[in-house]
Image (spheres, rainbow, N blue to C red):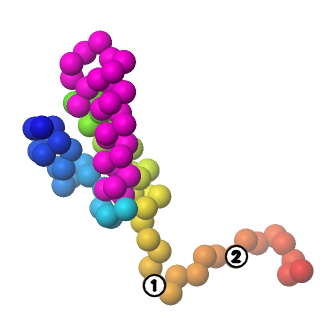
Amino acid sequence: MLGAFFMATDYVTSPITTKGRIIYGAVLGILTGLFRVYGASAEGVSFAIIFSNLLVPLIDKISMPLPFGYNKPKKEGKANE
């Protein structure tokens, strides 16, 4: 319980967006379950938090919304067909 309330919700290492926090929580829960069932150590929560924190930059990159009015740049090299 201490891992869920204090270590996993640390502002420095948790995702920024709400969507990212949901993904982070799901990954954290799945990894905790896997480490508890298949791991030999009793520290499944701590290991899951460490591995989930490694994924936070990727989760932030995936879940970051585009700014209002932003258009994706068009690919160059193809002629207008």
Report which quarter residue 30 is drawn in: top left
In the image, what residue type sits under mark 2? Lys
In the displayed orientation, state which residue is furthest to the bottom.
Answer: 69
Label 2: state its secondary structure: loop
Q: Which residue is mark 2?
A: 74
Q: Nearer the viewer, residue 10 or 25?
A: 25
Q: Is residue 55 left or right of residue 14?
A: right
Q: Nearer the viewer, mark 2 or mark 1?
A: 1
In the image, what residue type sits under mark 1? Phe
Residue bounds of the magenta highlight = 20-45
Please say whether residue 58 is visible from this viewpoint: yes
Q: Is residue 34 left or right of residue 11?
A: right
Picture quarter with the C terminus: bottom right
Report which quarter residue 46 is drawn in: top left
In the displayed orientation, state which residue is furthest to the top.
Answer: 40
Q: Which residue is mark 1?
A: 68
In the displayed orientation, state which residue is furthest to the right.
Answer: 81
Determine whether 35 is above or below 77 in the image.
Answer: above
Decide whether residue 27 is among the magenta residues.
Answer: yes
Give the Cα distance between marks 2 and 1. 18 Å
Determine whether 30 is above or below 42 in the image.
Answer: below
Q: Position of residue 75 (x, y in %)?
A: 73, 71
The residue at 36%/27% (across/down) is 34
Q: Position of residue 62 (x, y in %)?
A: 47, 58
Main SS of residues in magenta: helix
Q: Nearer the viewer, residue 22 or 10?
A: 22
Numbered circle sitting on residue 56: none
